[in-house]
Amino acid sequence: MSDVAETLDPLRLPLQGERLIEASAGTGKTFTIAALYLRLLLGLGGSAAFPRPLTVEELLVVTFTEAATAELRGRIRSNIHELRIACLRETTDNPLYERLLEEIDDKAQAAQWLLLAERQMDEAAVFTIHGFCQRMLNLNAFESGMLFEQQLIEDESLLRYQACADFWRRHCYPLPREIAQVVFETWKGPQALLRDINRYLQGEAPVIKAPPPDDETLASRHAQIVARIATVKQQWRDAVGELDALIESSGIDRRKFNRSNQAKWIDKISAWAEEETNSYQLPESLEKFSQRFLEDRTKAGGKPRDIHCLRRSINCLQNHCRSAIW
């Protein structure tokens, strides 16, 4: 088998057996299919022709999209009409029709055959793949067990939104205020929820590596997270009085961790630690006192001290907060 690509001549392509044509965008697929359709209608192509002329009812054209189907149907109809006129006039300026005319011996009979085909074009079998499959199922409804009347849905986005909106009404509206507030911080409504989960609604279902216990509820998970946040706040309040001295003696590079910023960060976290816990939001400043952050800002030869166990608690808390509703 040769690996060299051959230039396709739609008027000489053999129309018997199976033929595979590979083509990229903009290479004339619609033109080629429409030309092959004319050949099949009139039995043209010499030794490469189909054994006999075919009727519109005997031809099936399948493509991918509705837009391509409409374009192809229009092109075929136009070609049939223009070639019929060319047969009646026995002349044409179109190079494609000119080559076809050279093969037609009885142009008057060809014009009559094309007129019949033109009148049948409303019934021509030009479908998308899914449209053709649906037609076959409908024609064989008893054998396939399909309903006689049904609608093929090509765009599921509206149904998915309706399902999300229904879920939102059923499960989010009845939530206690404090939990509803947390959910709202993540998703402002069903549309936002759909954007995050839409990719999981196609193909294989995602595998949940660590599913929650069967008896766990959203309320119990919320209570656990609030308790963990309260623990972190208490750890901060217990350690905040020693922070200045510990950081000062740790070899920290003050060009990267200046005292002014340090004081601001401590004030923000301390204010948060005194507040009642109504959300899962953690202050960004809390990260500034983690072991990793301090190590990156310690002078060469210095040894940062692990101020307290906040870092581990923060990591665990962040993951727990996220998994509570996601």
Image (cartoon, rainbow, N blue to C red):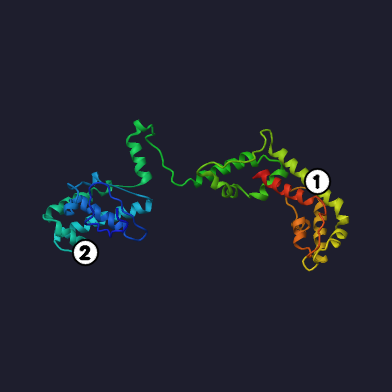
Residue 324 placement, left or right of 77? right
Mark 2: amino acid: Pro
Residue behind mark 1: 231
Q: Where is residue 110 in the image (x, y as percent from the top left)?
A: 15, 53
Percent coordinates x, y for residue 50 in the rendering:
19, 48
Point out the residue furthest to the bottom here: 255
Which residue lies at the image location 67% right of the left edge and 39% below the top edge? 174
Q: In this view, does 72 lie above or below 93?
A: above
Res 114 visible: no
Q: Where is residue 207 in the image (x, y as percent from the top left)?
A: 58, 41
At label 2, counting other C-alpha atoms closer than 10 Å, the crowd grade (few under 14, some 14-19, many 20 or more) is: few
Quadrant (top left, top right, bottom left, bottom right) of the C terminus:
top right
| CA distance for labels 2 and 1 | 84 Å
Residue found at the far left of this picture? 106
Q: Which of marks 2 and 1 is in front?
A: 1
Position of residue 146 relative to residue 85, above or below, is above
| Residue 201 can be seen in this image | yes
Q: Position of residue 161 (x, y in %)?
A: 54, 45
Q: Report the residue marked by disc 2.
A: 95
What kind of element bears circle 1? Answer: helix
Amino acid of disc 1: Thr
Residue at horizontal 14%, vertical 60%? 102
| Foreground residue among 164 and 10 | 10
As helix, strand or loop, the secondary structure at mark 2 comes to helix
Q: Which mark is residue 31?
A: none
